[in-house]
Amino acid sequence: MKFFLISDNIDTQMGMRLAGIEGVVVHERDEVEKALDSAMADKDVAIVLMTEKLINLCHDKVYDLKLHCPKPLIVEIPDRHGTSQISDTISSYVREAIGIKL
């Protein structure tokens, strides 16, 4: 099992490559969706890391995959341009999935 990175900047990709994590750098919505579909189809990928900016670019698709696909796990990572409000994102997922406000 392995990690796969989908990033919007080369700095994040280079840092992850130093840790042994391969990935791609994309900028447009269609590129993000293509990279995400490819990672989801790869049976060896257990965790997909995506930068916050790219999650926001195709929020609907990522949200749908998180709810309906048990594997791989999609994890949002902050980058140098991110706002790092990941706890708010997690709370909104819980609220929308089971109807409980935390």
Image (spheres, rainbow, N blue to C red):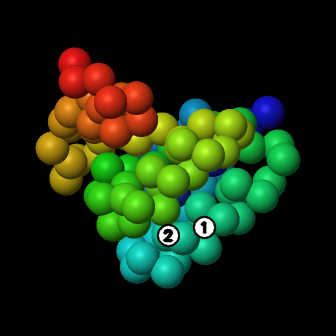
On the rendered structure, is 4 left or right of 74? Answer: right
The residue at the far left in this view is 83
Q: Which residue is mark 1?
A: 35
60 over 86 or under it: above or below: below
Q: Residue at x 21, y 48 (%)?
A: 82
- Residue 44, image x and y in percent? 82, 43
Residue at image point 70% right, 39% down? 71
Instruction: Give the percent coordinates (x, y) of residue 31.
Output: 52, 77
Using the rendered view, name the quadrant where residue 9 is placed.
bottom left
* Tally of numbered discs: 2
| Amino acid at pointer 2 | Val
Rendered location of residue 55, percent (x, y): 37, 55
Amino acid carrying mark 1 in the image: Ala
Toward the viewer: 3 or 68? 68
Q: Residue 32 has which mark? A: 2
Contact (CB < 8 A) between labels 2 and 1? yes
Tell me: residue 44, above or below residue 99: below
Of helix, strand and loop, which one carries label 2? helix
